[in-house]
Every structure is written in C-alpha cells, then in structure tokens.
Amino acid sequence: MSHYEAFQSEHEEITANVYSTYLEFYKVKQEFVKKRQAFLHALTQTEKGSSLQPLLAAESEVQGNKEQMISEESETTTQQQTKSSPLFHKLALATHPDKHPDCNPVFFQQAQKANEQGKFAKLLFLCRYLRIDTPTSLTPEELAELQAAIEKKKKKIEHYKKTYPWLYGNADTEELRKKIMEAFCKVNAS
C-alpha cells in the first residue's frame, strides 16, 4: 500500500467515525432528554422530591445559562473559520431557506452556528448526513481535530449514560428506581 493510499484510507475511516459518533451522540442525547423528563416527573411525585422543588424549578434556567456561557466561551479564530468556510459554503448552498424553502431550516442554522464556532467536525457531519460532497483530503491538523471531536462526543455519551435520569430510565425494577431516586435526593438535599 502506498503512502497516498494509507492516507486516503485514514481520511475515509476518520470521516466515517465522525459521522457514526455524531449519530450516536444525537440518539443518546435525545433518549437522555426523554429519560430526564420522566425522571423529573417521577421525582416531583415523591415526598422527598417535593423538598427539591426550588432546585427542580431552577434547573431549566441553569441549563439555559450553561448553554449561553458555552457559546460565549467558544471564540472563533481566523484559522478555524478558513478551514470551516468551504464546508459551510457547500452546506449553505444546499440548505439556505431562501434557495431551498422545502429544506428544514434547522440544517442551515446548525451549519451557520458550527461555522461561527469553528466546529469543523460538525460541518463534516452535516455534509455527510445531507449527502453533500466532503473534502477528499485532510491535513494532519484537520485529522487531529476530528479525532479530538470524536473523543469529546464519546465522553459526552459516557456522561449521559452515568446520570441519574439515565440510570433511572434503564432500571429493571421499581425497587432499583426507588434507590436511584433516594440517592439523587440525598446528594441534592445537602
């Protein structure tokens, strides 16, 4: 195998890995949101949960503030923008609401946000998801950035699967659900 062929197969492998990891992440996140809603509903029905009402009421506000802080913290460098721009341009041509009114505007909004934040991996994912051509070659820096994005998404997936709502939602018995609920109340009551 030549050096060029090895580089191409590495590029294809990491691109496919970005795509599959992002798909898994969005599936897990969607499932987590459902489990979290069920967990919070069950928690408000318990006697111990009623003492946590202020915590539960403020949780959505805190979550919104976290997301705002994260978006404010992610500053885009010129280098990131130049790297992301060709992918964003392809996505914008294919998803812009003015040019494609039948296309879901969420895709354009996500691409725009990813471009502003310099998230090359997300733009690559969106291109693959929408079956838009992706670059045929990537630099070693881009490959490293994609690998870092994959690792970050995998850590987030692991985090979701270790939360109380996830454990509660996957509990086999009502007794186990009760123990998870008690542990959550004990940790958050102090």
Image (cartoon, rainbow, N blue to C red):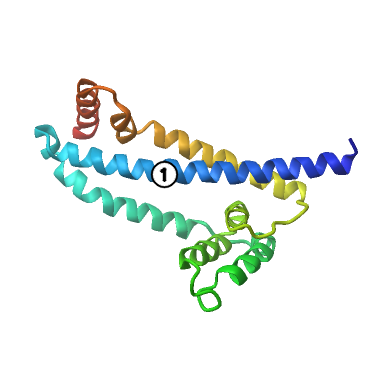
Image location (x, y in percent) of residue 133: 69, 59
Which quadrant of the figure contains the C terminus?
top left
Decide which of 26, 56 is in the foreground and name it: 26
Type of amino acid under label 1: Lys
Say which of 23 and 114 sits in front: 23
Residue identifier under label 1: 29
Q: Residue furthest front?
A: 102
Q: Viewed as shown, does residue 165 lie left or right of 9?
A: left
Give the side of residue 167 with respect to residue 57, left or right: right
Q: Residue at x 63, y 41 (%)?
A: 17
Q: Residues within 10 Å of mark 1 (few under 14, many from 20)?
A: some
Q: Quadrant of residue 42?
A: top left
User: With respect to residue 6, does 168 lie above or below?
Assistant: above
Q: Quadrant location of residue 188?
A: top left
Going 71% across and 46% down the picture, which residue do you hit?
Answer: 143
Percent position (x, y) of residue 153? Answer: 52, 42
**In the current view of this chain or complex, which residue is farthest to the right?**
2
Give how far across and how far down residue 7 sits, in percent: 81, 42
Q: From this view, report whether residue 145 is shown above or below residue 103.
A: above
Front residue of this view, candidates 145 and 172 = 172
Tell me the quarter of the image containing the N terminus.
top right
Question: Which residue is nearer to you in this view: 164 or 61?
Answer: 164
Q: Position of residue 178 (x, y in %)?
A: 19, 25
